[in-house]
DNA sequence: TTAGGGTTAG
């Protein structure tokens, strides 16, 4: 194997690292028998000058009696590198001792390494010497050099050593070392080339389970520095290992499954696990759990059930994690009662697994997320008394978040007190859920106060803390304070991530401060973050609102340069802009481009056009669009679409058509809302269709649709004018009754 | 097992 040679480099690695290498660790051998040939040779060597060795007959006869391993021992036990090298040279000069030379050389290398730790240059010199003198390398000598060069990132030198090993001596472990060396420094493609050789038929060094471990521990590592590995490649590798009867250890199988699932490749993960199962290799419950997690995230219930069934058939017992995943899945689908049933079964001992704090936390979080935080709170008692589980930080965080999101900030603070009284440590998430609760319920200044007091106690916020506060100030239209916090966060040691940039950009955009938004965008790019499609759409919309079409197009170009194609929202945004400015030609052009790009218009697309035609008093054109959406593109109109049409029709005194649209809504199952009724009532009032209005007032009450001040204004004026205040009184009453039932 | 963000019709 040939790799491009890089200039010779010396890397000084630490002494300790080199000493740890097993081959040099032989410093204190057992006390030798003084009459043994090894001891005799040693004492003879050490008591005479090397120049006298060639002419010493007793040395000559002693040496010829030694086996190569004995020569290895002798060389190793010489006091230093210099002596070992003299001895080695002596052996080389004696024609009948050539069998011992590779092992003696190995010992010389060991001496050199011990005396020159962290200096692979010395070893490289010796290696060159061995090549020049055609000294064959023992496998151990080669291993030593390979390890040393790999450590020092002298990869080309490492490969030279590998190429210098006698073909017949190469075995799997040596190749594994070379592969590990290459991978350590990110040279994936070279490692794969070598792996190909291992995979070759009749290879003398087929891959083993170490090879799998070395390979996957590198490429699945988060700090992997080489080129990225595709899922396809990983899958192929696993299959090829399988062909050689090597399957990844359960741990690696689990890691690979997790990776595939995270990237949305559950199919691949599924195949992989089943290949493993079918090969009869031991599939552990952890691997199944990884796949179940992925399947849950993709809502693939059919496969979840199938996998559970297969586990049962293969005797893979679900563990507490498996049930945790099941409960989590049920919670995610708001099927809390079924999730609670699983807990009951666990507690009854029906499942053979006891619930742990994870199970309780998942359930408490699930309950809080559907607004059943009171029940969540009660679970704390049950976890304590039924399961001897103590609530931890996460338990409290979930509950505090639940109460705060429900607006019960005081209860949240109470729980915060309780946790500190019970000695449960709070963390930055505790702080953030409390701050978020306060901010979302309009208590931004309390939030700042609380943050201040926590900082006084040494609790630092993080990026999330600042995102919460920045968004809150943006929503409160206090952009300057938001900007100030944005500046402050880095001074306080909180690094900015993409989310905090997005939040601020969104706030500035909403406030119409497009120059500031543009400035933050440039900061964001400087910080190495890219804008995503949502962010681009936001900015395009912001520039459109400011009538800066050129800037909007600039964004569009920028976005395409970054490899993003305009999506439905992009097109709808531009189309709405043209609709608002009454430029119907351009609006239709955008719609055509959208369709040409393979995107189907949405209800928003039609809504923008209908709205535009309505405001231009072109109700016919608006109705034509409405009919188009029903016939040609089968986009279901929503309440907003009907509202615009009904309002416009009524204003144009086409109340009959408006009424027919009310029927249409009923047929299509689209619910009218207060705006619908208000528009209709105005039309009916113009015609003074008293019977009709009573009919719709009843319908409104039946549907528990709340009247607003506009409704009341129309009805009060109209019904009192015709002396029917009693009907109005009943209507209001009916609403109050239905409200109290609700 | 817990926390943060953003776009389009009205």
Image: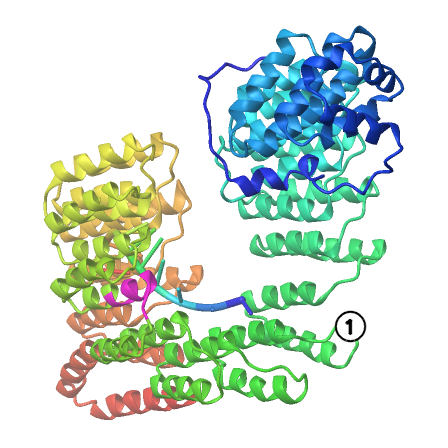
Q: Who's the residue at 57% across and 41% down the image? A: A17
Find out whether residue A461 is within the magenta segment. Answer: yes
Q: Residues within 10 Å of mark 1 (few under 14, many from 20)?
A: some
Say which quarter of the image contains residue A718: bottom left
Measured along the vertical axis of the image, is residue A417 above or below residue A307? below
Residue at x 39%, y 89% (from the top left corner): A414
Task: List x then y, in percent, for residue A580.
Answer: 15, 48
Task: Please give the range of residues in magenta.
Answer: A460-469
Give the x, y percent position of residue A716: 17, 84
**Chain ID at mark 1:** A
The residue that mark 1 highlights is A351
Image quadrant in which you'd find residue A353: bottom right
Q: Can you say which quadrant of the picture contains the N terminus of chain A?
A: top right
Residue A509 lies in the magenta-colored region: no
Of residues A131 and A426, the one drawn nearer to the viewer in this rendering: A131
**Residue A424: x percent and y percent?**
48, 81
Circle 1 — which element? loop
Relative depth, front residue between A306 and A379: A379
Applied colour scheme: rainbow
Who's the residue at 69% across and 17% down the image? A50
- From this viewpoint, is residue A232 visible? no
Residue A67 in the figure: left or right of residue A2: right
Judge left or right: residue A85 versus residue A676: right
Measured as percent of width and height from the top left, residue A228 is found at 50, 33
Q: Is residue A501 left or right of residue A249?
A: left
Q: Is residue A211 above or below residue A683?
A: above
Tell me if residue A14 comes above or below residue A92 in the rendering: below
Please, what is the dominant secondary structure of the magenta stretch? helix
Question: Could you tell me which quadrant the C terminus of chain A lies in?
Answer: bottom left
The front one of A611 and A212 is A212
In the image, A512 versus A399, the foreground residue is A399
């Amino acid at each position: 194997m040939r790799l491009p040679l890089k200039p010779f480099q010396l890397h000084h690695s630490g002494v300790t690292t080199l000493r740890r290498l097993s081959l040099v660790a032989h410093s204190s051998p057992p006390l030798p028998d003084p009459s043994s040939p090894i001891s005799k040779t040693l004492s003879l060597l050490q008591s005479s000058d090397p120049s006298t060795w060639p002419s010493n007959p007793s040395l000559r006869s002693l040496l010829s009696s030694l086996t190569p391993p004995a020569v290895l021992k002798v060389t190793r036990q010489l006091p230093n590198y210099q002596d070992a090298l003299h001895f080695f040279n002596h052996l080389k000069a004696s024609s009948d001792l050539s069998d011992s030379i590779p092992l003696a050389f190995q010992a010389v290398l060991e001496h050199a390494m011990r005396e020159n730790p962290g200096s692979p240059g010395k070893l490289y010199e010796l290696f060159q010497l061995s090549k020049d003198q055609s000294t064959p390398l023992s496998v151990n000598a080669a291993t030593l050099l390979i390890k040393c060069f790999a450590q020092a990132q002298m990869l080309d030198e490492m490969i030279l050593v590998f190429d210098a090993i006698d073909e017949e001596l190469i075995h799997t472990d040596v190749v594994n070392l070379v592969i590990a060396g290459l991978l350590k420094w990110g040279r994936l493609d070279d490692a794969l080339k070598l792996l190909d050789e291992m995979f070759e038929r009749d290879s003398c060094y087929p891959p083993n389970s170490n090879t799998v471990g070395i390979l996957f521990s590198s490429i699945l590592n988060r700090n992997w520095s080489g080129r990225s590995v595709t899922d396809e490649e990983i899958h192929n590798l696993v299959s090829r290992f399988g062909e050689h009867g090597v399957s990844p250890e359960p741990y690696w199988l689990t890691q690979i499954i997790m990776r595939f699932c995270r990237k949305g490749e559950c199919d691949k993960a599924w195949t992989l696990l089943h290949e493993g199962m079918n090969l009869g290799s031991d599939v552990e419950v952890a691997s199944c759990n990884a796949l179940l997690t992925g399947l849950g995230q993709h809502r693939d219930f059919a496969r979840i059930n199938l996998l559970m069934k297969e586990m049962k058939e293969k005797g893979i017992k679900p563990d507490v994690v498996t049930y945790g995943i099941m409960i989590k899945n049920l919670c995610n689908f708001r099927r809390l009662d079924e999730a609670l049933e699983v807990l009951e079964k666990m507690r009854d001992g029906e499942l053979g697994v006891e619930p742990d704090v994870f199970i309780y936390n998942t359930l408490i979080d699930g309950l809080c997320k559907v607004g059943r935080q009171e029940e969540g709170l009660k679970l704390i008692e049950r976890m304590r008394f039924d399961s001897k589980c103590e609530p931890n930080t996460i338990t409290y965080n979930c509950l505090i978040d639940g109460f705060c999101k429900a607006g019960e900030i005081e209860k949240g603070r109470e729980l915060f007190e309780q946790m500190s009284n019970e000695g449960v440590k709070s963390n930055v998430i505790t702080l953030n859920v409390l701050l978020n609760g306060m901010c979302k319920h309009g208590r931004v200044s309390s939030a700042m106060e609380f943050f201040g007091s926590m900082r006084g106690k040494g609790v630092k916020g993080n990026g999330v803390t600042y995102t919460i506060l920045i968004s809150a100030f943006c929503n409160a239209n206090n952009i300057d304070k938001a900007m100030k916090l944005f500046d402050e966060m880095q001074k306080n040691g909180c690094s900015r991530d993409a989310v905090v940039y997005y939040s601020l950009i969104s706030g500035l955009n909403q406030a119409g401060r497009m120059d500031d938004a543009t400035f933050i965008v440039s900061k964001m790019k400087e910080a190495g973050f890219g804008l995503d499609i949502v962010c681009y759409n936001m900015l395009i919309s912001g520039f459109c609102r400011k009538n800066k079409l050129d800037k909007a197009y600039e964004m569009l170009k920028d976005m395409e340069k970054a490899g993003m194609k305009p999506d439905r929202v992009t097109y709808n945004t531009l189309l709405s802009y043209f609709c608002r400015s009454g430029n119907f030609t351009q609006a239709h052009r955008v719609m055509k481009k959208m369709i040409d790009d393979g995107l189907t218009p949405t209800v928003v697309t039609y809504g923008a056009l209908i709205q535009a035609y309505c405001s231009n008093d072109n109700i016919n054109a608006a109705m034509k669009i409405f009919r188009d959406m029903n016939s040609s593109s089968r986009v279901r109109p929503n309440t907003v679409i009907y509202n615009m049409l009904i309002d416009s029709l009524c204003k144009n005194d086409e109340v009959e058509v408006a009424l027919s649209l009310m029927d249409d809504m009923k047929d299509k199952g689209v619910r009218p809302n207060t705006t619908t009724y208000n528009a209709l009532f105005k039309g009916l009032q113009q015609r003074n269709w008293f019977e009709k209005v009573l009919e719709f007032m009843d319908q409104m009450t039946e549907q528990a649709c709340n009247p607003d001040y506009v409704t009341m204004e129309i009805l009060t004026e109209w019904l009192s004018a015709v002396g029917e205040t009693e009907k109005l009184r009943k209507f209001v009453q009916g609403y109050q009754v239905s409200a109290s039932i609700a």
